[in-house]
Amino acid sequence: MKKVIKRTLVKTVVWRLIGSMDTFVVSYIVTGTFETALKIGGIGLFTKMIMYFIHELIWSKRKKKGLTVKRSFFKTLTWRMIGSLDTFIISLFIVEAVVTAATIGGIGFFTKSTLYFLHERAWSKIKWLKTSPPLLKEHEIELIDDFKIDIKSIITKNKE
């Protein structure tokens, strides 16, 4: 469990740096003000760090059949729904304009979806503190092979 928490913490910090830079840039482009963009990005840095850490822990507890592209896609989708809602709420609080807040959240949904998906795929290749299923011992492999043969013979007999 300690490995999972350490890896999740590092992933959280790395992603929040990337995500917050994107939020700052999008907010600056939409509002045209450095101060507003800094507030939205800065507040989001902290709120999303907590939410992302929890999101990542939940996904790390799910049964894995490898870190597939499909898994990365669904992680991206779930995180972006959470993250974009947070960005919208923060933006609305700061700019007090629904259209501006929705624009920041909406653009961020698309820019960060791409960035996050690439981030997930990169982390799927990083072995550092990655948990993996325990390796089977030779006698366990033989038992599984014997079981497969028994099942095949039963199926074959039933078809005759």
Image: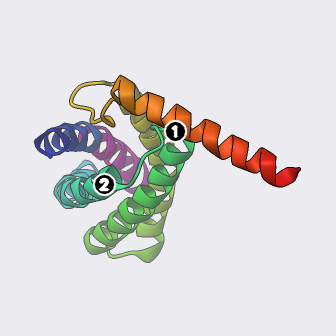
The answer to whether 74 is drawn above or below residue 148 in the figure is below
> Residue at 20% across / 61% down in the picture?
47
Residue 109, image x, y percentages: 48, 55
Q: Is residue 103 left or right of residue 131?
A: right
Please give left or right for residue 74 compared with residue 131 in the image: right
Residue plotted at (75% across, 49% down): 155
Q: Residue furthest left?
A: 2
Q: Is residue 111 magenta?
A: no
Q: Nearer the viewer, residue 29 or 3?
A: 3
Which mark identifies residue 68? 1
Counting from the top left corner in percent of width and height, residue 110 is at: 53, 50
Q: Amino acid at mark 2?
A: Lys
Label 1: element kind: loop
Q: Place residue 70 in its image quadrant.
A: top right
Between 143 and 74, the one nearer to me in the picture = 143
Do the residues under discs 2 and 1 have CB atoms within 8 angstroms?
A: no
Please tell me the numbered disc located at residue 33: none
**Residue 148, picture quadrant:** top right
List x then y, in percent, for residue 63: 40, 52
Magenta stretch contains residue 31: yes
Colour setup of the view:
rainbow
Q: Closer to the camera, 123 or 50?
A: 123
Depth check: give the residue in front, 154 or 87. 154
Mark toward the start of the polypeptide (2 vs 1): 2
Give me the residue at 45% from left, 63% from top: 81
- The circle drawn on residue 61 is 2
Magenta-drawn segment: 17-32
Q: Residue at x 80, y 54 (%)?
A: 158
Image side of residue 53 versus residue 108, left or right: left
Q: Tell me the element at label 2.
A: helix
Q: Residues within 10 Å of mark 2 (few under 14, many from 20)?
A: few
